[in-house]
Image (cartoon, rainbow, N blue to C red):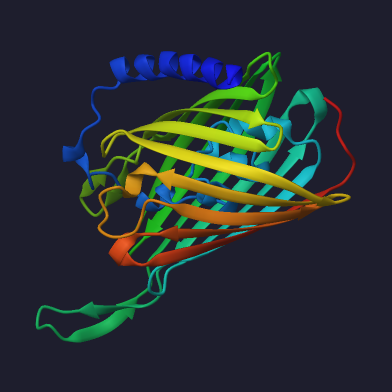
């Protein structure tokens, strides 16, 4: 309980600071930013926990959630993620990180979304061929630690293709602070701070997101995490997640996860509970998440993580 109290007060301090400096957040701005695929969650572990991942350790997927947490890796790490989305949409993610001791950790990632084949309809309402939209982002990452503080950043190249292509460049900046109890951490992340995307004659902003999060092990095997998000194209929303670890035998562990993603609160139907599980053995992990979107449908995410090489001391 003491950990949660610390987490709560630190979280409030960061929250009030963020609210006072970002009054631009508004529901009236929904749909006004480009490259919406950048909002799609990465990794089944994080999705199952309601995407409350700013202060969580999540392998090389930290490149997406908070680049500062990439510093914690003590081995080369490779992660694959596949999402079964709606209709013919396929969503892929691959990330790789290499730690260099106290010099920091370097990483790279690819985020890729394909939307299948879409019929082109002419002015006479007749089919006139087809096109295949694709979204893609490339990440280059570096993370470093200074005492109990971790800092990290991404450089991103973003490309969206409908029939014509548009590109943009952006940075993500993250920090994480470990409290003295070594069970609680607080994080702040700024994502998609960059240039505008221009399709034809119109330019649109990227989906800028500022978030702060806190996580704590309330029990030795029970993690609770909370994020609050300040997007430039929607209202403030919360993410809440839990993870319960069950040691099985030797180096094998099972993880049960549940979470709430506040972005989906206005979608009609069952949408408030994300669920999932994970299994890890030595340096290999597999994770699954079930994410409902109410009447729109259900999605399933699968992830595979692999660590290899020598342990790097820090």
Q: Is residue 58 left or right of residue 22?
A: right
Q: Is residue 88 left or right of residue 137?
A: left
Image height check: is 30 above or below 147? below
Residue 69, picture quadrant: top right
The answer to whether residue 163 is seen in the rendering is: no
**Camera-side residue of 258 and 196:** 258
Q: Residue furthest left?
A: 124
Q: Which part of the image, by quadrant, shows the N terminus?
A: top right
> Residue at image x 36%, y 42%?
262
Residue most toward the bottom? 126
Q: Position of residue 32 (x, y in %)?
A: 23, 44
Camera-side residue of 69 and 37: 69
Q: Is residue 66 above or below residue 163?
A: above
Is 229 in front, or is 293? 293
Residue at image coords 35%, 15%: 16
Residue 19 spot, x, y in % from top left: 31, 20
Please say if 207 is above or below 135.
above
Residue 27 figure quarter: top left
Q: Quadrant of the C terminus?
A: top right
Q: Residue at x 76, y 53 (%)?
A: 280
Of 139 and 201, the residue lying toward us: 139
Residue drawn at 34 percent across, 41 percent down: 206
Coordinates of residue 167 in the picture (x, y in percent): 39, 49
| Residue 76 is at least partly visible in this image | yes
């Amino acid at each position: 309980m003491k950990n949660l109290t610390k987490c709560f007060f630190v979280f409030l301090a960061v929250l009030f600071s963020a609210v006072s400096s970002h009054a631009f957040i508004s529901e009236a701005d929904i749909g006004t930013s480009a490259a919406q695929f950048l909002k799609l969650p990465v990794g089944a572990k994080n999705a199952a926990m309601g995407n409350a991942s700013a202060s969580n350790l999540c392998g090389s997927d930290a490149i997406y959630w908070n680049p500062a947490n990439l510093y914690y890796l003590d081995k080369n790490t490779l992660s694959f993620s596949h999402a079964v989305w709606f209709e013919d949409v396929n969503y892929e993610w691959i990330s790789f990180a290499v730690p260099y001791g106290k010099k920091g950790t370097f990483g790279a990632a690819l985020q890729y979304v394909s939307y299948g084949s879409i019929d082109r309809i002419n002015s006479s309402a007749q089919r006139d061929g087809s096109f295949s939209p694709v979204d893609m982002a490339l990440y280059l990452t570096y993370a470093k630690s200074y005492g109990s503080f971790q800092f990290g950043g991404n450089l991103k190249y973003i490309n969206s293709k409908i029939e014509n292509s548009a590109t943009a460049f952006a940075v993500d900046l993250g920090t994480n602070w470990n409290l003295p109890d070594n069970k609680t951490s607080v994080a702040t992340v700024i994502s998609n701070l960059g240039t505008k995307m221009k399709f034809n004659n119109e330019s649109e902003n990227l989906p800028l997101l500022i978030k702060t999060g806190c996580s704590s092990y309330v029990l030795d095997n029970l993690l609770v995490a909370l994020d609050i998000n300040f997007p430039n194209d929607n209202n403030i929303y919360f993410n809440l997640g839990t993870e319960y670890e069950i040691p099985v035998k030797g180096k094998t562990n099972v993880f049960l996860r549940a979470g709430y993603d506040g972005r989906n609160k206005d979608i009609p139907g069952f949408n408030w509970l994300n669920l999932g599980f994970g299994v890890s053995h030595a340096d290999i992990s597999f994770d699954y998440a079930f994410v409902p979107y109410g009447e729109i449908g259900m999605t399933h995410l699968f992830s595979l993580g692999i660590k290899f090489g020598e342990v790097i001391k820090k």
